[in-house]
């Protein structure tokens, strides 16, 4: 069985996004995340574009955790799922704004290759409708995502989207991941809203001590479960 699929009953989970461009940086950070409970790793889009899908297997060898290939697929879903699977990925990402035909191919690919399908709402102008469509077309996980450009120019981060997370969770009944400028202080609010997976990048990858930063996120996740 897919290794990430095995983890999903232990949610909430922490997905560490390695949105760096150099392989050595990715492996240095990844090596500090070994043996952390409820943690797995993402080979970020910039890293894949810079170093290729080979990074997936290299990261997995270092962390011994499941790895997501953040391909942000918009077309040729079957092909990109096959390439991600061959590289060792446990999940790959497809854009929610992709056409129906691509989402159907993505579902077919997920079933054929036993790879989880994560559908990303980044830049969606109608996230509720797009999340419903993603669920209908076989998404395993729906990602509520504030992109880096939007974060930097508008100052918007994902912790302000708790209401949207709650609506998507209740209407789709799918696992919901959240990404976009997340820090420990924003995590309890998102978990209470229904987030199953917290995708954290810069707070961990830019830290002088990535392992400690990841532990802070895990502590925030655990504390949110212990409060009403």
Image: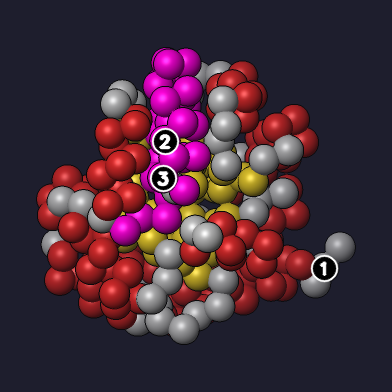
Q: Residue at x 44, y 48 (%)?
A: 115
Residue holding disc 2: 109
Q: Residues within 10 Å of mark 1 (few under 14, many from 20)?
A: few
Residue holding disc 1: 227
Which tag, 1 or 3, sits closer to the chain's start? Answer: 3
Left or right of 208 in this view: 135: right
Where disc 2 sits, the SS reads: helix
Q: Nearer the viewer, residue 43 or 115?
A: 115
Q: Residue at x 28, y 68 (%)?
A: 59
Name which quarter of the figure residue 7 lies in.
bottom right
Count of numbered circles on the image: 3
Name which quarter of the figure residue 155 lies in.
top left
The numbered dot on residue 105 is none
Residue holding disc 3: 113
Left or right of 58 in this view: 192: right
Q: Which residues are magenta?
A: 88-114
Residue 150 belongs to magenta span: no
Query: Eyeballing the image, is 126 above or below 18?
Result: above
Q: Nearer the viewer, residue 80 or 43?
A: 80
Residue 112 belongs to magenta span: yes
Nearer to us of marks 2 and 1 is: 2
Q: Residue at x 42, y 71 (%)?
A: 65
Q: Decide if residue 92 is in sight here.
A: yes
Q: Residue at x 56, y 25 (%)?
A: 137
Q: Kindly indicate whether the residue at mark 3 contacts the one at mark 2 (C-beta within 8 angstroms).
A: yes
């Amino acid at each position: 069985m897919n290794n990430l699929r095995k983890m999903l009953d232990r949610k909430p989970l922490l997905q560490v996004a390695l949105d760096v461009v150099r392989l050595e940086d990715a492996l240095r950070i990844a090596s500090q995340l070994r043996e952390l409970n409820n943690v797995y790793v993402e080979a970020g889009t910039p890293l894949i574009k810079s170093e290729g899908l080979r990074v997936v297997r290299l990261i997995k060898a270092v962390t011994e955790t499941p790895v997501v290939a953040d391909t942000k697929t918009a077309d040729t879903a079957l092909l990109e799922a096959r390439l991600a699977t061959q590289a060792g990925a446990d999940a790959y990402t497809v854009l929610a704004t992709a056409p129906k035909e691509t989402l159907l191919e993505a579902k077919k690919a997920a079933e054929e290759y036993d790879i989880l399908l994560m559908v990303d709402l980044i830049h969606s102008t109608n996230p509720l409708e797009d999340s419903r469509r993603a669920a209908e077309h076989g998404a395993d996980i729906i990602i509520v995502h504030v992109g880096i450009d939007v974060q930097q120019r508008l100052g918007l981060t994902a912790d302000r989207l708790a209401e949207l997370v709650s609506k998507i969770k209740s209407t789709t009944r799918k696992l919901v991941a959240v990404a976009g400028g997340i820090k420990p202080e924003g995590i309890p609010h998102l978990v209470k809203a229904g987030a199953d997976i917290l995708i954290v990048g810069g707070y961990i990858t830019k830290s002088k001590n990535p392992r400690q930063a990841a532990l802070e996120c895990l502590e925030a996740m655990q504390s949110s479960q212990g409060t009403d």
